Amino acid sequence: MSVVDVCTAAVAALPVGGAGLSAMSRTAASHPLCSTDDISEQLEELQLTLGEGPCVDAFARGSAVLTPDLLTTGLQDHWAVFADAALEAGARAVFSLPLQKGAISPGVLDLYASIPTVLDTEELADALAFADLATLLLLDTRIDETGAPTGGPMPDGCFEDLGAYRAEIDQASGMLTVQLGVGIEEAFVRLRAHAYAQGRRLADVAADVVARRLRFSPDAEPDQDEEET
Amino acid sequence: MDQQLLAKTFVELADNLVADFDLIDFLRLLTDRCVDMLDASAAGVLLADRDGKLRVMAASDERVRLLELFQLQNDEGPCLECFRTGVPVIVPDLGTATARWPRFAAAAQRSGFGAVQALPMRLRDEIVGALNLFRTAPGPFDPAATPVAQGLADVATISLLQQRTAERSTVLNEQLQTALNSRVLIEQAKGKLAERQGIDMEQAFTALRGYARAHNRRLADVARALIDSSEPLTDLGS
């Protein structure tokens, strides 16, 4: 499963014509990752080129930006160039959902519809769930960079963060920023990489970190972290 | 009951509402004041997320947070019952509740609690969560304290729902989503600070909140500044 599959699934499940996903960052250049059709692709490109639009706002604010109708009075002032360009491209409603987990915010999921559209409560809940899944998938693509084994089947519960909330996972990520001297996103990726590599549940690894039974060291290979005795 | 403290609490809660609203900070203030005023040893707040599943949003200490989680995991306990029925659940002696909630009663007693009451957070027909008060010693709850606790729960509920517009549930949904993300952010910051200072999560939270209050900042903003290392935050946890 990849972020493309999430976009495809979102289009199938929601009253939207297309979906696109862009990697966003406060420090590095943003870039489109995938889109399900030409209009979505144009919307992603437009926003990143113009530096304005619902996706840019959703990323900056850290909350969903829902635009049921781009012809709504005032919007053309707010997104002076984007609103007209998006209408021109064939979009009428645009929904931008930030991908985020606390301070980790790797991108934005954009959905569009070619007619004015309001997402009801359940549809919005589904859209948010797709955004959550896309967040983890996007971050997991970075596990390759850590050298942890990939390609095999993901262990059970690799998306357990999507279920019952475990504060320990976030606390452990925060602790790893100090132990590894890295940012929060990298720390979370390393925590997940370790869980995959060891075939353990993420919550259990996190609990060990929080209880200070497990320390990560910047020098050690991710699958050889020293267990404190 | 300390009338002065009660008055001060309502002023504090109201202040929180008119200022830049931080749900997590607000709920934590609520649990702390319940403990200070209401003959409770610990308090916790659970709110329903977008799927209608309860989540622990605030707890006056780590022990009660774990106990609330235990209820959710085992799908039994006064809080869940209160949330499902929308009516208060009051158990003056947990020793009598072993048949009703075998696992929860045992876990609560292991954590040192003898009595519990769960009050619904509801507005008209909508139940958004529950406020739980735990007490170490078994025995009847002060009949004057329960309505005050319910009043505090009601204020919290109204605050949660205050920004609703025509598309009310959609807005609530987003607000809760934002609040849940703030919660994640604060947990990440607690972890970073705990590791940096060699302190536990509870001490880290106290330090973060103390800093936010002393500098008149939102807790979530201080948490983000810490995570992003975007500010020196010099007197934090030192």
Image: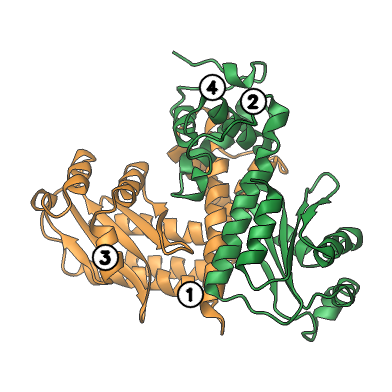
Chain colours: A green, B orange
In which quadrant of the rendered view does residue B8 lie?
bottom left
The answer to the question of whether label 3 and label 4 lie on touching residues, with beta carbons closer than 8 A, is: no
Q: Earlier in the sequence, mark 1 or mark 3?
A: 3
Q: CA distance from mark 1 to mark 3?
A: 19 Å
Residue B1: % across, % down: 23, 64
The crowding category of the residue bearing disc 4, from other C-alpha atoms within 10 Å (few below 14, some 14 to 19, many at least 20), is some
Q: Chain of mark 1?
A: B
Badge 2 marks a residue whose secondary structure is loop
Residue B205: % across, % down: 49, 43
Nearer to us of marks 3 and 2 is 2
Amino acid at circle 2: Ala
Badge 4 marks a residue whose secondary structure is loop
- Asked whether the residues under marks 1 and 4 belong to the same chain, the reply is no
Number of the label disc, if any, that sits on residue A90: none
Residue A90 in the figure: left or right of residue A170: right
- Disc 4 target residue: A215
Nearer to us of marks 2 and 4 is 2
